[in-house]
Image (spheres, helix red, strand yellow):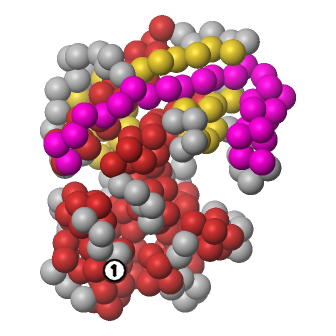
Amino acid sequence: MKTLIQITFLLFSFNCISQTLILDEVKCKVRKNEKKAIEEMIELQSDYYKALFKIKVKTIRIKVFGRLKAFKKVRDSISSGRIASETGFYSHSTKTIYVHKYYDYIRVIFHEINHAIIGQIIRRTPPWINEGMAEFFETFSINKNGLSMRLQNSKLERTRKWILEKKINLRDLLNYSHREWHKKNTKPSGYSYSVSYSFICYLHFKHPKSINSILKNLKAGKNSLEAIEIASKKRIEQIENDFYLFMKKSTYNNV
C-alpha cells in the first residue's frame, strides 16, 4: 500500500474559501498560509458532510493559544480536569475548538474540525468512528495537484502487531462507550486511536462508500454493529476476520 494515496471518496471543488470560520488568536499569530489551509479543510469536511446529510454546517469557532499555561487554564475550566490533552480539543458545550500553538498544531485543528462538524449531525457518535474519522482527516492536504493524504503508518503498524499477537478484539472496541474507549487507549498506549483509525482505513479500501452508509445509519439510530453490517452486507464476524486478514497482509513504510 502506498504511503501517499489519492482520496477517491471525496470529490469536491476547493476554489471557494470557507466563510464558516471564526478564528481567535490568543497571544499568537496564525500565518496567512496556515489560515488558508484551515479554511480549505473546513470547506473540504463541510462539503463531505453537507453532501452526505443535506445539511448546512454551522460556523466553526477555533481559539489558538500561544502559551501552554493559558491553554491549560481554559481547558481545565471547561472540562473540570476530565481532558488531559496538551495539544487541542473540541468542546461540545461551547461549540469551540481549543488548540495550543505548537509545531504540529495545524494537524490537530484538522482533527478537531471533524469533531466540530460531526457533532452537529450525529448525537452521541460512537467513539471508534468519531475519533477514527478525525484521525483519517488530520493528514489530508490540499494543493495545486488536488487532494491527498498520508497514511499514519505508525498506527497501522501497531494495529498489525497487536493483531498478530492476538491482542485485539474489534467487536469490543466497536461497542465501547466513550469512557471505555478512552480507558482502553492507555493499555496498551494508543490502542483505541490506532485500531479505530486502522478500521476506518480498512473500510475505505475494502468497502468503498461504506463509511457514508455507516454514518447515515448511525444518525438513523442504528448501533455500530448494525450500521456496519448494513453497509458491508456482511455479518460482523466476517468483517472482523476480514479486517484481521487485511491488516496482517498489508505492509507499511515506517514514518
Residue tagged 1 = 225
In the image, 51 versus 148, the foreground residue is 51
Q: Where 6 sits versus 122, above or below?
A: above
Q: Picture quarter containing residue 16?
A: top left
Residue sitting at 55 percent across and 32 percent down? 96
Whether residue 139 is visible: no
Q: Residues within 10 Å of mark 1 (few under 14, many from 20)?
A: some
Residue 83 screen position, x and y as percent:
72, 50
Q: Is residue 45 above or below residue 176?
A: above
Which quadrant of the rendered structure holds the N terminus? bottom left
In this view, the residue farthest toward the right is 69
138 left or right of 101 in image: left
Compared to residue 101, the image places residue 242 above or below, namely below
Q: Give the left or right position of residue 78, taking residue 47 as reference.
A: right
Picture residue at 25% right of the left edge, 34% below the top: 56
- Quarter of the image where one finds residue 138: top left
The residue shown at (62%, 32%) is 98
Q: Position of residue 90 (x, y in %)?
A: 56, 41
Instruction: List x then y, in percent, for residue 174.
Output: 44, 76
In screen coordinates, is 23 left or right of 186?
left
Horizontal arrangement in the rendering, residue 35 relative to residue 98 (left or right): left
Residue 252 or 77: which is nearer the viewer?
77
Percent position of residue 86, x then y = 73, 40
Residue 177 colored in magenta in the image: no
The residue under label 1 is which amino acid type? Leu
Residue visible at 32% across and 91% down? 237
The span picked out in magenta is 53-80
